[in-house]
Image (cartoon, grey):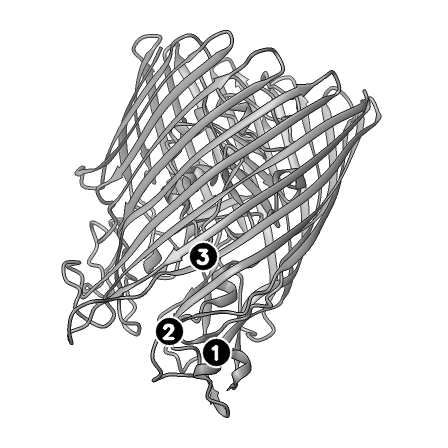
Amino acid sequence: MRSVLLSALLVSSAMGTTALAQTDTAPDVEGQDRGDRFSLGQIIVTAPRTEGIAIDSSTLSSEAIYTFSRSSLDDAINLMPGVSSGNSGGTRNERLVFVRGFDRFQVPLSIDGIRVYLPADNRLDYGRFLTSDIGEIQVAKGYASVLDGPGAMGGAINLVTRKPTKALDVEIRGAVNVDNDTDYAGYSTSALIGTKQDTWYAQASYARNVTDHWDLPNDFTPRNPALEDGGTRDFSRTQDWRVNAKVGFTPNATDEYALSYTHQEGSKGAPLHISDIVTTPRFWDWPSWDISSVYFLSTTALGDRATLKTRAYYNQFDSMLRSFNDRTLTTQSRPFAFDSPYEDKAWGGSAQLDFRPSEADTLRLAFHYRHDKHVEFQTSFSTAGAPTTEPRQTQTENTYSAAIENELKLTPDLTFTLGGSFDWRDLKRAEEYGSPLGTSGTPAVIYNYPRRDSDAWNAQGRFDWRASEAVQLHASLSSRARFPTIFERFSQRFNTAIPNPDLKAERATNAEIGGAWTNGALRVEGAVFYSWVENAIFSVPTPAYPCTASNKPPATATPGCALTNLSQSRNVGKGDYYGVELSVSATLMPGLDVGMNYTGIKRDLTDPSNARFRPTGVPTHKGFAYLDWAPAERLHIVPSVDLASNRWTLFTATPATQPQLYYRTGAYVNVGIRADYAITDGVEVGLGARNLFDDYYTLTDGFPETGRTVFATIRTRY
């Protein structure tokens, strides 16, 4: 009851205020210098933006991330309207992000505009991306510019690193967490040092986050103590660190050239389902989840009317999954025990030419190229003898995109932007090791799946109208596609699925009408949106699969056989996503700021082969509200509340002979509070709590969320 009353108070304060606050209402244009944000690493987002801890529709500042103690990407981005985070469940233990209902496959993630993509399955774990050294998080929702590359079917997310703003720029942060029982639970720390000179700059940063464990809420009642007995959540330990270094050259007011290097390493456990007695537990562990990237970014003025922007990069992704005999995670001798490493690489680049034939017209041309290489092999264990290791299997493909966009000022206050692109993918190699489907008992061999190339078009248009100094309106329509991953096309899912090399791209057509109103210190921003989804990929049951020479290597063909109880990925789904977003921020009086945002979304997505299917992971209603109170000159007290309604999840402990069961779960009112005191102009200390009332809630079947956490922080800046 206390949390409900507090949330109602915060929301009513935000909605009822008519006081004044100072905001920056200039459009957020790609490449525009934003102080400590690395401008070369920004993507195109079109909404106006605010400063400080105010949260708008398309950007999240580093100050907001710090104030609300959000140390990982999934947790931080959940502050924004239209975006929700969740948990994959299962032994993969991945943190998820949805943008207006679109998932990690349909919303690309970038760091400084460089795509982070896992070639095999793109199962990104957003909990592995730290935020303490990030200058800004950008989110393009629905309308994501074709100039920024392929794949943005439902939007795009970009992490913009920081850059120095003065001759000596230093910041050090630290935080210690304790659990429900006031026991040590982990820590986070970051450090940044940089310099900005007349014609060059340089910076290095380091961030580390260690979760020793986290506690379940005190009212958790164990259902199966052998799986989870309460208190400390078993296998909840994680640790991640990242370094970023960059050096830049700014020979004049228009040109900039920068070389950056980012390396991050992560490891995590895999908590078990709290009550599943139907499925045999998987005792998995992830000792490594690592990403490295070196990239060059530039912008060069070509006379007075043209600008050339380039990006070139080399990425490397290495991960290891280990499966053990039992919960001790010490021995590997049973048939289900294995070591499964992935070794992935990618390289490529892009070039964008902006040409202004007149003061009212800007034409932009862009070309993107990316080469992905995935290598996997598995070491299997058994009680019968020594471990066996597969030969290395390789998949490689090239992806291209050519885009054009024209921005025309129809009047000084009305702008029309029209863009389109053509994407194509060239699959070079798709190897697998084993007995081809339908040939059980034959010797395992390296064989190639049939190779198919594919292409897709994209088109979009947008009107932006500055109706007055206080009111800005926009309307957009965008149709975008995304190619299926190698996993979706070829994975046999432990001999239960049929590959489909002809799988086509998914598509979404996104419409939006929105605007922003600023009246001194009061700012209101909102949008209504609708998305039509086509060719959605679902796993479809296949009653019988004839095994003939046409669908497997001739040397192992067994004409006339048939397989049953299999599935295949197909483009059979369609549906509609629609909803509304609202954000309000204001200064009620000197020293008292308030803000809130709300998202309402409905997803009607159908799978013709499964009448019981429901789209999971996204709450129907979601909100966030806060007060920033400065009762004294050096003291800030910030209470906040996260709210969400139920979302669909799948009951995973269903016997294979029974139909799937979807149900609603996940409603919560999660209250937080934080107080910071500035000891000096450059040193401040803080104390706070998350999930203050120890609310028990579950976002996905069998995997509860963290209970109360208390933290202490220190930050020094020079």
User: SS at mark 3?
Assistant: loop
Is 224 or 478 nearer to us in this picture? 478
Do the numbered discs 2 and 1 sit on residues whose CB atoms are within 8 Å? yes
User: SS at mark 2?
Assistant: strand
| Residue 440, image quadrant | bottom left
* Residue 634: image location, x then y, percent: 36, 11
State the CA–CA distance, disc 3 to disc 1: 22 Å
**Which residue corresponds to mark 3?**
120
Mark 3: few/some/many CA within 10 Å (<14, 14-19, 20+): many
**Which residue corresponds to mark 2?**
445
Q: As displayed, is residue 548 above or below residue 627?
A: below
Mark 2: few/some/many CA within 10 Å (<14, 14-19, 20+): some
- Per the rendering, the mark at residue 360 is none
Q: As displayed, is residue 233 above or below residue 623?
A: below
Q: As displayed, is residue 231 above or below residue 597?
A: below
**Which residue corresponds to mark 1?**
553
User: SS at mark 1?
Assistant: loop
Tell me which numbered mark, 2 or 1, is placed earlier along the sequence.
2
Is 665 or 552 nearer to us in this picture? 552
* Residue 652: image location, x then y, percent: 38, 68
The quarter of the rendered structure image containing the N terminus is top left
State the CA–CA distance, disc 2 to disc 1: 10 Å
Q: Residue at x 50, y 64 (%)?
A: 488
